[in-house]
């Protein structure tokens, strides 16, 4: 009888442990979704502004129109994901970001002016600031797999940010701080590139790292030539080329982070 009771107790404890681990796994999965949604908004906040200026300057018009459309859709999707929380502070932040997105949509529908261009830059930074605060909230520094996912997403963000300021400079936004922001984005990208170069990959992800390593010295010069050169098409194509390799690494680390 005692043996039966002990087995029952063990079974109960195992069931409780399994339930706890299952709930923890679900919570971790939801946190990854929230983290990625916030990281995505960091990227698309820059992408939308970049596409706006490219479209105004009639450079890669079809691609710019598609980038705008995709960016707006992606932010709406990610805002919806971030709204799914019981955290009141987060809900307030997401509501504010939603209002900011409405302002961006309003600008896009109007004819271009310097004032609208300035507002687009401001609103893209507002969205970025809100997204950054949510990224910090959902980041677990102890998870190395999660850290590498963030790094690959941030590398895409830095490229979009650098391109945004490059094309805005061409539209007359030549303030020294804008140039400084571009330079900081390039430094951020380069710092993260060293991190992924030190990471042990194989197969397709390693091939992606090799491409980034090989092409970056050339690409870097295009971005930093903002005040000497006028290469908006080359900069746009360069960004897209680098982001193809980053997409491979991002997917790789996403899969690892989800599995943990």
Image (cartoon, helix red, strand yellow):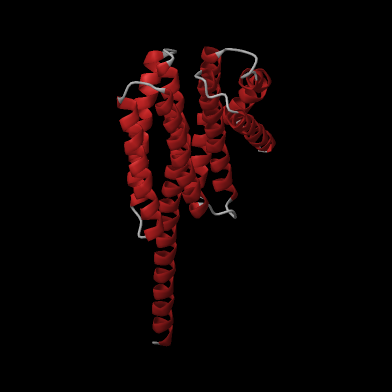
Q: Is residue 144 above or below residue 227?
A: below
Residue drawn at x 39%, y 82% as measured from the top left: 4
Expressed as whole percent of the image width and height from the top left, the position of residue 31 reads 44, 52
Residue drawn at x 57%, y 24% as measured from the top left: 174
Expressed as whole percent of the image width and height from the top left, the position of residue 168 reads 51, 23
Q: Quadrant of residue 222?
A: top right
Q: Nearer the viewer, residue 84 or 229?
A: 229
Q: How many marks?
A: 0
Expressed as whole percent of the image width and height from the top left, the position of residue 186 reads 63, 30
Evaluate whether residue 222 shows in this view.
yes
Split into 4 quadrants, where in the image is the N terminus? Answer: bottom left
Q: Nearer the viewer, residue 26 or 113?
A: 113
Q: Nearer the viewer, residue 249 or 175?
A: 175
Evaluate whether residue 201 shows in this view.
no
Does residue 141 appear to the left or right of 49 in the view shown?
right
Q: Residue furthest bottom?
A: 1
Q: Is residue 160 above or below residue 93?
A: above
Q: Quadrant of residue 88?
A: bottom left
Residue drawn at x 41%, y 79% as measured from the top left: 9
Expressed as whole percent of the image width and height from the top left, the position of residue 46 reads 47, 32
């Amino acid at each position: 009888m005692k043996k039966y009771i002990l087995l029952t107790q063990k079974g109960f404890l195992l069931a409780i442990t399994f339930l706890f681990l299952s709930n923890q796994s679900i919570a971790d999965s939801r946190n990854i979704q929230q983290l990625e949604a916030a990281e995505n908004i960091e990227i698309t906040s820059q992408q939308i502004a970049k596409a706006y200026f490219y479209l105004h300057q009639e450079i890669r018009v079809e691609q710019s129109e598609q980038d705008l459309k995709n960016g707006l859709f992606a932010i709406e999707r990610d805002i919806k994901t971030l709204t799914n929380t019981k955290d009141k502070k987060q809900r307030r932040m997401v509501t504010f970001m939603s209002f900011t997105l409405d302002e961006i949509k309003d600008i896009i529908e109007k004819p271009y002016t310097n004032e609208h261009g300035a507002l687009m830059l401001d609103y893209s930074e507002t969205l970025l600031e809100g997204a950054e605060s949510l990224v910090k909230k959902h980041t677990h520094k102890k998870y190395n797999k999660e850290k590498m996912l963030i790094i690959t997403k941030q590398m895409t963000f830095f490229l979009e940010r650098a391109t945004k300021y490059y094309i805005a400079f061409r539209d007359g936004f030549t303030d020294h701080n804008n140039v400084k922001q571009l330079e900081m984005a390039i430094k951020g990208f380069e710092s993260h590139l060293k991190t992924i170069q030190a990471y042990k990959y194989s197969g397709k992800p390693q091939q992606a790292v090799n491409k980034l390593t090989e092409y970056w010295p050339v690409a870097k010069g295009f971005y930093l030539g903002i005040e000497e050169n006028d290469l908006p098409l080359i900069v746009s194509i360069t960004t897209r080329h680098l982001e193809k390799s980053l997409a491979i690494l991002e997917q790789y680390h996403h899969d690892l982070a989800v599995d943990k």
